[in-house]
Image (cartoon, grey):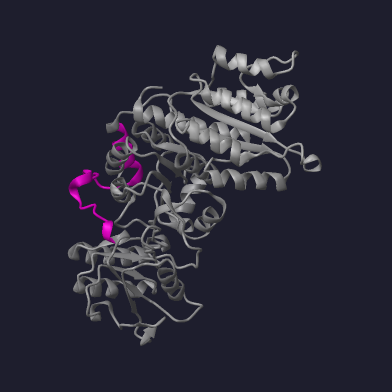
């Protein structure tokens, strides 16, 4: 995890801007407010035209229409298809400009060569924004570049904002609006918003997160080739979105370093932004060029930008989801002093190593905490942080009692800012390890809502899954390893320092 970055010195903002300009091959970056950034109607349109809508269950246009209906989108839906009279019971129109009502947004699912005419129809109709899901533009070479320039020219003259091309586009879990053309389960409403340059985040990754993670979603924006609407535009919108508390970003390239820097710095001071930037290697850069036509940015320069703006940069998808979960479910800690409870000596040692690795400190327990723990520990036990809760169990004779005693003592200690718990279990002796997770942890959360708690279990698959389900229901981040426990707490501490500057 890049919590502190790789670069030895901090380039000035001017150097960051210049390096972005050189690396991305763009013209002199515009100041962030030189172009309208209001993209609200792409997330909250009162009406949408679906160009390529279909009744055919093998067509993307069918899946998109089903999603709009199933997700409960309450705006007006206008199917557009010259070959059909109706689609899923709704009147179908041959072109966008033939629709008699106002159309605020449009989604296109037809081949790239037909998109310029659709853009002209949208301009004639007064459409404010269009989501171009179709591929076949910049990422395909010279002909695609020409086609892309043509639709940009039409949009600029008409004042239309474009998301894409080459994207699954938009998902608003709050109002049910989407341009996603793969069938997905009903999105769970929550506080997490994603910005992604890859369509996989509004498809396979979204389904993965919906079925494995306890947090819900507010907005998701797949940007594709980013010919117009970019990460900074979406960040500006999410900054004003009261439903968004955490922002996660997957990015392959940046075309306007100055604009992104200004917007990211402003918003990161209010809401945590966790970012995964791929295409950091030569091979990755070549892959991104064929994927979304993105040009590579020097990794050390992007790293410096993250440090100077307060972005939390991560190394892979696993870490992106881990930290997103931590920010969605936990309060920000007041400091970096960690209390650790582990039912194994090895867990205590490895947790201590992880704290040092990620720049955290083991809390020094107060005399009151030490007295309470020592009173119930066996005479031979050495009590300290991390707490080997198995020794406490030997003193009190019950695992639930030892966990509750240890957790209450640590949570009550004013020297402890955050807590990591490592549980263990053996399926063959499950009754010994039958922990009342819901009762014990719900009580601590209620009594100490200001302290973040993370947990992991070292056990067989069945018991791990059982524990994960219980922690998910409580809204306590559960991770597959104690290292990821500490890594998540380190990110919370890092952002707390960014936001409040007190750690």
Query: Image quarter for residue 382?
Result: top right
Q: Say how many tags the image has.
A: 0
Give the answer, above or below, for where 420 lies relative to 259. above
Residue occupying the point 64% across, 22% down: 387
Q: Is residue 5 something that shows in the picture?
A: no
Seen in the image, is 288 located left or right of residue 443? left
Of all residues, the one furthest to the right in this rendering is 428
Residue 368 in percent (x, y) is at 56, 14
Give the answer, above or below, for where 404 lies relative to 110. above
Residue occupying the point 61% across, 17% down: 372
Q: Is residue 236 something that shows in the picture?
A: yes
Residue 301 in percent (x, y) is at 39, 35
Residue 308 in percent (x, y) is at 35, 31
Give the answer, above or below, for where 116 lies relative to 39. below
Seen in the image, is 310 located left or right of residue 394? left
Q: Nearer the viewer, residue 169 or 486?
A: 486
Q: Which residues are magenta?
A: 15-41
Q: Quadrant of the C terminus?
A: top left
Q: Is residue 21 magenta?
A: yes
Q: Is residue 497 magenta?
A: no
Residue occupying the point 51% across, 32% down: 489
Q: Nearer the viewer, residue 361 or 10?
A: 361
Q: Nearer the viewer, residue 400 or 458?
A: 400
């Amino acid at each position: 995890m890049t919590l502190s970055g790789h670069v030895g010195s901090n380039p000035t903002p001017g150097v960051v801007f210049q390096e972005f300009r050189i690396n991305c091959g763009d013209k002199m970056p515009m100041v962030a407010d030189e172009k309208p950034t209001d993209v609200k109607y792409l997330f909250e349109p009162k009406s949408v035209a679906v160009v390529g809508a279909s009744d055919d269950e093998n067509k993307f246009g069918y899946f998109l229409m089903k999603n709009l209906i199933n997700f409960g989108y309450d705006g007006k839906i206008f199917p557009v298809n010259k070959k059909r009279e109706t689609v899923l019971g709704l009147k179908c129109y041959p072109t966008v400009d033939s629709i008699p009502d106002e159309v605020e947004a449009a989604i296109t699912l037809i081949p790239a060569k037909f998109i310029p005419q659709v853009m002209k129809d949208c301009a004639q109709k007064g459409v404010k924004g269009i989501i171009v899901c179709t591929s076949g533009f910049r990422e395909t070479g010279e002909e695609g570049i020409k086609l892309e320039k043509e639709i940009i020219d039409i949009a600029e003259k008409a004042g239309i904002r474009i998301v894409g091309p080459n994207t699954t586009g938009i998902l608003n879990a709050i109002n049910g609006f989407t341009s996603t053309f793969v069938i997905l389960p009903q999105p769970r409403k929550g506080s997490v918003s994603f910005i992604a340059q890859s369509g996989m985040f509004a498809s396979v990754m979204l389904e993965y997160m919906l079925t494995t993670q306890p947090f819900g979603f507010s907005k998701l924006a797949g940007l594709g080739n980013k010919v117009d609407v970019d990460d900074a535009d979406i960040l500006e919108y999410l900054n004003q979105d009261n439903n968004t508390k955490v922002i996660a970003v997957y990015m392959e390239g940046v075309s306007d370093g100055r604009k992104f820097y200004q917007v990211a710095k402003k918003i990161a001071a209010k809401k945590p932004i966790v970012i995964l930037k791929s295409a950091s290697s030569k091979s990755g850069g070549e892959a991104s060029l064929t994927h979304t036509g993105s040009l590579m940015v020097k990794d050390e320069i992007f790293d410096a930008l993250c440090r100077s703006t307060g972005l939390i940069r991560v190394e892979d998808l696993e870490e992106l989801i881990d930290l997103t979960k931590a920010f969605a479910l936990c309060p920000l800690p007041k400091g970096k002093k960690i209390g650790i409870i582990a039912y194994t000596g090895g867990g205590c040692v490895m947790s201590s190593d992880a704290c040092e690795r990620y720049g955290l400190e083991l809390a020094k327990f107060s005399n009151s905490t030490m007295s309470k723990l020592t009173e119930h520990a066996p005479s031979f036990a050495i009590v300290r942080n991390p707490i080997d809760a198995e020794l406490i169990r030997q003193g009190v004779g019950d695992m639930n009692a030892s966990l509750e005693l240890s957790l209450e003592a640590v949570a009550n200690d004013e020297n402890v800012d955050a807590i990591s718990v490592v549980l263990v279990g053996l399926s063959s002796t499950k009754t010994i390890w039958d922990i009342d997770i819901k009762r014990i942890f719900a009580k601590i959360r209620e009594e100490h809502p200001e302290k973040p708690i993370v947990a992991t279990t070292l056990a067989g698959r069945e018991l791990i899954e059982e524990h994960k389900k219980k922690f998910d229901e409580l809204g306590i981040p559960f991770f597959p390893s104690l290292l990821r426990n500490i890594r998540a707490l380190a990110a919370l501490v890092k952002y707390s320092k960014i936001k409040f500057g007190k750690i």
